[in-house]
Amino acid sequence: MVKLLFRSPPRSTRSDSARGLVTQLLRRKCEPWAPGLSYGRCGSTLEPVWVGTDTGILKGVNLQRKQAANFTPSGQPRREEAVSALCWGAGGETQILVGCADGTVKHFSTEEGRFQGQSEHCPGGEGMFRGLAQVDGTLITCVDSGILRVWHDNDKEASSDPLLELRVGPGVCRMRQDPARPHIVATGGKENALKVWDLQGSEEPVFRAKNVRNDWLDLRVPIWDQDIQFLPESQKLVTCTGYHQVRVYDPASPQRRPVLEATYGEYPLTAMTLTPGGNSVIVGNTHGQLAEIDLRQGRLLVCLKGLAGSVRGLQCHPSKPLLASCGLDRVLRVHRIRNPRGLDHKVYLKSQLNCLLLSGRDNWEDEPQEPQEPNKVPSEDTETDELWASLEAAAKRKLPDLEQSQGALQTRQRKKKRPGSTSFLKSLCSRCK
Amino acid sequence: MAKAGDKSGGSGNKGLKRKAATEERQEAAVAEDGTTESGVQPSKAAAFPPGFSVSEIKNKQRRHLMFTRWKQQQRKEKLAAKKKLKKEREALGDKAPPKPIPKTIDNQRVYDETTVDPNDEEVAYDEATDEFASYFNRQTSPKILITTSDRPHGRTVRLCEQLSTVIPNSHVYYRRGLALKKIIPQCISRDFTDLIVINEDRKIPNGLILSHLPNGPTAHFKMSSVRLRKEIKRRGKEPTEHIPEIILNNFTTRLGHSVGRMFASLFPHNPQFTGRQVATFHNQRDYIFFRFHRYIFKSEKKVGIQELGPRFTLKLRSLQKGTFDSKYGEYEWVHKPREMDTSRRKFHL
């Protein structure tokens, strides 16, 4: 019995009859998702959020339907292929580069919904990928032991030597690429101070951060940079540390020490993202606490609640006030960070989530509904007609009350909320039911 | 509010109880005779204007009186309704509708989306390859180290000893003020698979830290209702050296599964049924009840049980990925009372 939860290897190897069976099974299994589901088009650009898990599955999550499509490079989940880094590939948001725990980088096409080509084996160094980036057809990878390599991102050439290799220092926790200047990367880690490298320049870092002064007991303050972000429209960088500090560095100033330091909470901060305004960052710690910290004053603005486990991935939408967070509690949450603040979507994905990618598209809510409407609208009408007919038959006297009260309720809710009246109407409606 | 007026006229400051009694008798008399005072009907309902509630009476004694009277009325009505229903059921006989199931908090539990579906492949793979895989694949057999917080008192020490008789292949060591982070590498090198630390506060054990050793999760529980062997009434004799069976009840969600597997990995695989001993971890409403019994089948259907061993209740506070590191470790689940305990019908295990 075939239970299709995972996508299988490339289409060309399957026979037509099998494909028919596959599409049938997929349709039956994923029916509520999209009516026009066919093997080629499933996992198309409908998903705004892509999440990588510990079991090697890449999930495309549809927030409206609270469902995830699972994709694995080899039809089964494997822990050796645990996704440790995700980044958008070349050509807009049509390709995703997936860094796995076994040292390979795989290409995933969002339009086709499958892993393409051969995985690039990027050996060298021990540990998982801590950063993935791509620029001008080359791939930048950084592993835990501190080896940063630039590879040719070419399917035809198999396992070529790296174009460039840098030793960044052991214990790297994050490597991040500057979105404005793609050849600039920053690295930082445990007892590995923040360094900014220019890949086109020399082998020495462009900026090397200095540790803060000794604390009030004259003890050296330990360093543990967990996440780095480049601030837009300036050369500044923000880091969040495992000692619950958020620091801003400015390479343009002569000061190598942090320009601003803020602390939050008592637990290591594991993930960080910039908000659309550019003036604040949102950080998450190992207890699942999310906080927005203003970078102009260095103070805490708001906390977001809901997460129960360590935050592994955080990303804000570039223009909308939406924040996607994933963590060890196996749930993807999308919060709205202003007016009104709160949880928008929550999707339970059954494996521990490691990293996520949010698409910067503006039209999330529109697309999934368009193919639905022509199909669903007539059926809904007939259903509601039957419903009204049954209601009329059952309670003739109450029907005009119900219609009036419903209309009245809607208008009242639009105008004002009067507690007494709505409760009265609610009691009416409940009686009618 | 003529009745109230009556009372204000009748009762004085002294002997209110007697006055109340007399008032009741007066009212009863009034009701029987049908005579009215100040032109008000004796039936209680009609005596007050609509919208009047007992709570508006300012005088506490009278308010209490009115309330008790109302309560008695309610009870009478309820009894009458029950009798009526019973008569109707008897009258209908076989055609009576089935009795409605009473609502309990367990019945009304909010459906948890993380409830594990036994056919789910992804969760099955996740469980098959998690940190307990080596135990469930029978590659390792458990070896437990039981210790306490520093300087334990008598109850805790006795609990540790009794626990070590319950859990086979377990060793109790005195803590000596050692740091857990230093104990753990030593345990790993000596092939221990689990570490249990019983925390003590004010001479009673109140916490349990269970850490699966090579790199496994650490669960921190709150322990309450600890009863040592001699405090258990009608208990059996000392437990024997046989390996007990395990019962894990009601661990339905994904978190519950993880915790259940943690408990299961404490005991060796091959229970000795001749020993007739069973350890039960029963989860109800997020509280885990631990009991240790000896059973005997008196006939095909009748079982007799004797409770041996200690008994305690656990509540999960946090589940941390990795061995014990409360400051810098990553947590899989943390109990947050203000966020998670808002609904009385939502449970997490």
Image (tube, coloured by chain):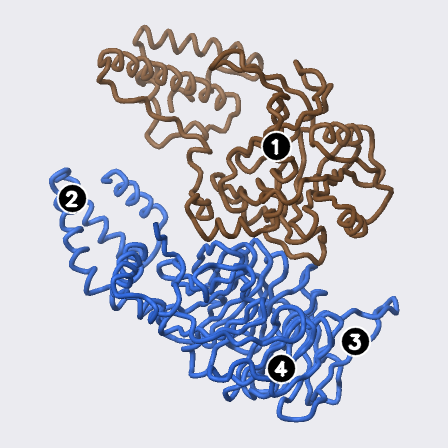
> Is label 3 on the same chain as label 1?
no
User: Is B72 in front, or is B47?
Assistant: B72
Q: Which mark is residue A122?
A: none
Quarter assignment of residue A160? bottom right
Residue B270 bears which disc, if any? 1
Task: Measure the C-alpha gap from mark 4 to mark 2.
Answer: 72 Å
In contact (CB < 8 Å): disc 1 and disc 2: no
Task: Check disc 3 and report the residue beneath it.
Answer: A212
Q: Quadrant of the rendered structure where residue B45 is?
A: top left
The residue to which callout 4 is attached is: A149
**Chain under label 4?**
A
Specify few, some or many for label 1: CA neighbours under 10 Å numbering under 14, 14-19, or 20 or more. few
Mark on residue A399?
2
For the residues bearing labels 4 and 2, Cβ distance under 8 angstroms: no
Residue at left offset 63%, top offset 59% = A286
Contact (Cβ within 8 Å) of mark 2 with mark 3: no
The answer to whether A43 appears left or right of A142 in the picture is left
- Could you tell me residue A347's position as x and y percent? 44, 57
